[in-house]
Amino acid sequence: MCKECGCGAANGTTRLQFTVTGYTDASAKDAEKALLGLAGVLYVHIHAHDGETTIDYNPAKTKLTELLAVFEARGLSAAL
């Protein structure tokens, strides 16, 4: 269960931590907005300076490939 909002296994959410390369301040804000616009994404936190990106999402509503497509569309490289 996450500390921020109390979500967790009981409601089917998953937390992933990516290391993303290529962020600028602007692209990090754009990626965050795009990720939060996906149906199952509940929480996004990005550290643009080191690429640490945390996403809480419901895999029944949003596929991992959809998350990765957000990064790819912005020329960013994401690894779990």
Image: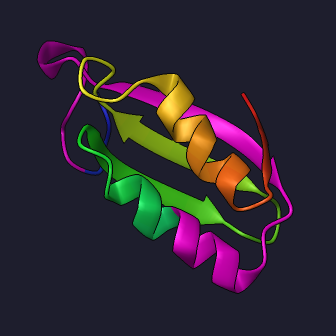
Between residue 71 and residue 58, name the one nearer to us. 71
Give the left or right position of residue 64, taking residue 51 as reference.
Answer: left
Magenta residue span:
5-31
Q: In which quadrant will I find the N terminus?
A: top left
| Figure disc tally | 0
Residue at image point 34% right, 51% down: 43
Q: In which quadrant will I find the C terminus?
A: top right
Between residue 19 and residue 3, name the one nearer to us. 19
* Residue 79 pos. (x, y %): 78, 33
* Residue 6 against residue 73 in the figure, above or below: above
Between residue 54 and residue 69, name the one nearer to us. 69
* 7 part of magenta stretch: yes
* Residue 21 pos. (x, y %): 86, 55
* Residue 49 pos. (x, y %): 81, 71
* Residue 40 pos. (x, y %): 26, 37
Give the left or right position of residue 73, taking residue 54 as reference.
Answer: right
* Residue 22 against residue 27 in the figure, above or below: above
Give the left or right position of residue 80, taking residue 34 as reference.
Answer: right
| Quarter of the rendering containing residue 44 | bottom left
Q: Residue furthest bottom?
A: 26
* Residue 11 against residue 57 in the figure, above or below: above
| Quarter of the rendering containing residue 51 | bottom right
Residue at image point 32% right, 36% down: 2
